[in-house]
Image (cartoon, rainbow, N blue to C red):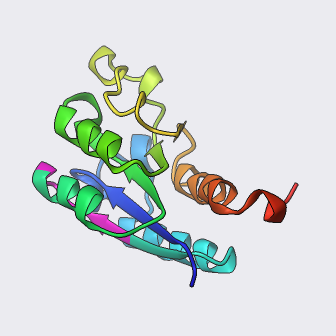
Amino acid sequence: MSKKILVLHGPNLHLLGQREPNIYGTISLSEINKKMKAKAKKLGFELVAYQSNLEGEIIDKITKTKYDILIINPAGYTHTSIAIRDAIAAINQPSIEVHISNIYQREDFRKKSLIADVATGYIGGFGQNSYYLAIDAAAAILRPKNEKKN
């Protein structure tokens, strides 16, 4: 049975491809999800992706879904949601925080992540490639030590 990667996309990410292309690029969320699924499958993992604009739905996915690792782009909730932070801390699963833009190069209010201290790692600032790099990181975390590739 393959290990499962859960990818959660936060608010407004359904607008990728239309929203501020100078920051977020022109690729749609469905295209990113398709590429992530193909990459995960090639690496031997199952990937399920979900997007919500609602904090409670994101928390339910974090705490009520079975998976081996979480990749999350909390979007605007990065800076505001103690509840999402607490859900990630409560699950005791590895997690990777992902951002398309580098939040530390943006407006001051975006430079504080409430998720960072409970995530296993952070990848941001590489556009859509941030997600694909997170798949590689997830694979490295999930592979038993004797199977890890150099």
| Residue in the image at 21% along x and 55% along y | 58
| Residue in the image at 29% along x and 35% along y | 78
The number of numbered discs placed on residues in the rendered structure image is 0
Looking at the image, residue 119 sits to the left or right of residue 139; the answer is left
**Observer able to see residue 89:** yes
Residue 17 picture quarter: bottom left
Span colored in magenta: 49-55
Q: Is residue 115 above or below residue 127?
A: above
Indicate yes or no whether the magenta region holds residue 50. Answer: yes
Q: Is residue 45 above or below residue 18?
A: below
Measured from the top left, where is residue 141 in percent x and y?
Answer: 64, 53
| Residue in the image at 64% along x and 52% along y | 137
Looking at the image, residue 29 sits to the left or right of residue 94; the answer is left
Check the image and name the residue furthest to the top.
108
| Residue in the image at 25% along x and 45% along y | 87
Residue 150 picture quarter: bottom right
Check the image and name the residue furthest to the right.
150
Indicate yes or no whether the magenta region holds residue 63. Answer: no
Residue 2 picture quarter: bottom right
Looking at the image, residue 24 sits to the left or right of residue 1; the answer is left
Measured from the top left, where is residue 76 in percent x and y?
Answer: 24, 38
Q: Nearer the viewer, residue 131 or 94?
A: 94
Q: Nearer the viewer, residue 120 or 50?
A: 120
